[in-house]
Amino acid sequence: MKSLLLLILLEFFMTKNAASIKSNGRKLRRFTFKDDPKVKTARPVIGILTQEVSGNREIFGYGQYVASSYVKLIEEAGARVAPILMDQTPDDIEKLFYSINGLLLPGGQSMLNASRYMTVGKQLVELAIKSNQEGKVFPVWAECLGFELITIVVTRVDPKQGGQYNPELFTATNATNYTTTLQFHNIKKSQIFSKMPKEYIQFMEQVPFSYNNHLVGMNSKTFNRYEPLKEMFRITSTSRDRNGREYISSMEGKEYPFFVWHWHPSKPQYEWLSNLNIFHSMYSTRVIQWLIDFFMDNAVQNDHKFPSKQVEDNALIYKHPLLYTERLGSAMTEYHFINRIPYKTQFALGEQVYVKAGKDPEKGEARLKEIIRMGKGRQ
Ligand SMILES: *[C@@H]1O[C@H](CO)[C@@H](O)[C@H](O)[C@H]1NC(C)=O
Ligand SMILES: *[C@@H]1O[C@H](CO)[C@@H](O)[C@H](O)[C@H]1NC(C)=O
Ligand SMILES: *[C@@H]1O[C@H](CO)[C@@H](O)[C@H](O)[C@H]1NC(C)=O
């Protein structure tokens, strides 16, 4: 009875409140972005490139995955996720590109000298550059391995020359399982940090909160050796590894909405393995929420759409089972398992390296059921 009364009262206040907002047309526009010519969609979908499942094959099987930390990061900013399956043909990838409103390149363990992550990622980054060149906003968010991929694409260095372990581009860093601070550069020029509340900047400068997990890094000297890198990007922050060596921790497009991090904004809110040195704090969450909101403000300015609701429904992440992978011994708390062999056809760079990975679809099905049972069922 009491709760019913409360509900009625709540309903009354909410309706009243909505009415008072409605009565002020100007204010309403500010809140809804209605009539803002820049905003092209209220239903953004962000593509996340999948990766090959790694680790113990007996446990994790053969397939592709998207760490749920990235999915939640996008969802918390008000968008949905379409995984970009790495076994698709270039034509299918291109079709998907023209259906999504932004791209996220996740961190991970793929070898960039021989992987579909590199091949498909390169195609996507090139499409994103072209789109922005033609005046159509298309934002890219890249973390860790995504940082390495973008620098390889933009410098046009052949990925087969060692991938992320090419000493021309990257040097060794002592920065695995490592949290540190960001030293900012060019804040006033930065499209993202110039708008950020000052206390958030101070937090990132003073508190070792950024989680790093990379064996290599790019320093400013190397960055400055490559004209195309300098043309497209500005360094917005550097950090120092455990040995005091400096590496670029954040960079952004000078003209384009590209936000590229060698650290992991997606970790503090969503990755909970206690064995990792991830800094969980109220402020980390707020700062990262602010950054991803900024990315999404760009994504809603893109007008790509799926050709039909059916194609869209089929492309979204929801149909791929979410596994409690931390329980299975993974460093990720949860991921979406995609039951498709990553390297199906021969068009892939480095195909021969991976084609041996599980060719028997029947075994694959049985394995999937087993993985789901282990990930979900065991208490
Ligand atoms: C890629 O690089 C790794 C490590 O540097 C090496 O072991 C592997 O053979 C390389 N693969 C190809 C196809 O070049
Ligand atoms: C990395 O840093 C740790 C802690 O400072 C140090 O003990 C270790 O020797 C360093 N490793 C390398 C390869 O420099
Ligand atoms: C990560 O670092 C923490 C704190 O330094 C340490 O306790 C933990 O064992 C490390 N985990 C791994 C996987 O190296």
Image (spheres, rainbow, N blue to C red):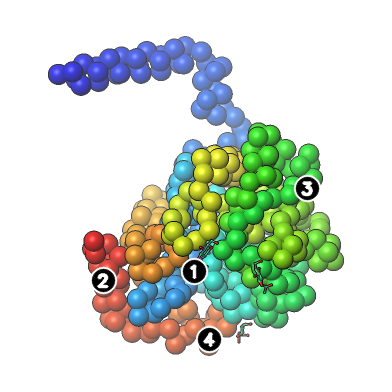
Residues packed near mark 3 inside 10 Å, few (<14), some (14 to 19) or many (20 plus): some
The residue at the point 65 percent across, 34 percent down is 199
Quadrant in the rendering for residue 90: bottom right
- Of residues 94 and 248, the one nearer the viewer is 248
Identify the residue under disc 2: 369
The amino acid type, in three-letter code, at marker 4 is Val
In which quadrant is the N terminus drawn? Answer: top left
Indicate the secondary structure of the residue bearing disc 4: helix
| Alpha-carbon span between mark 2 and mark 1 | 20 Å
Give the left or right position of residue 328, taking residue 121 as reference. Answer: left
The amino acid type, in three-letter code, at marker 1 is Gln
Identify the residue under disc 1: 51
- Return the disc, 2 or 1, that comes first in the chain's sequence: 1
Q: Position of residue 241 (x, y in %)?
A: 69, 62
The reply to whether dot 3 and dot 2 touch (C-beta < 8 Å) is no
The residue at the point 24 percent across, 18 percent down is 6
Identify the residue under disc 4: 353
Q: Position of residue 209 (x, y in %)?
A: 59, 50
Residues packed near mark 4 inside 10 Å, few (<14), some (14 to 19) or many (20 plus): few
- Of residues 136 and 362, the one nearer the viewer is 362
Residues packed near mark 1 inside 10 Å, few (<14), some (14 to 19) or many (20 plus): many
- Of residues 130 and 372, the one nearer the viewer is 372
Give the left or right position of residue 154, taking residue 24 as reference. Answer: right
- Return the disc, 4 or 2, that comes first in the chain's sequence: 4
Identify the residue under disc 3: 185
The amino acid type, in three-letter code, at marker 2 is Lys
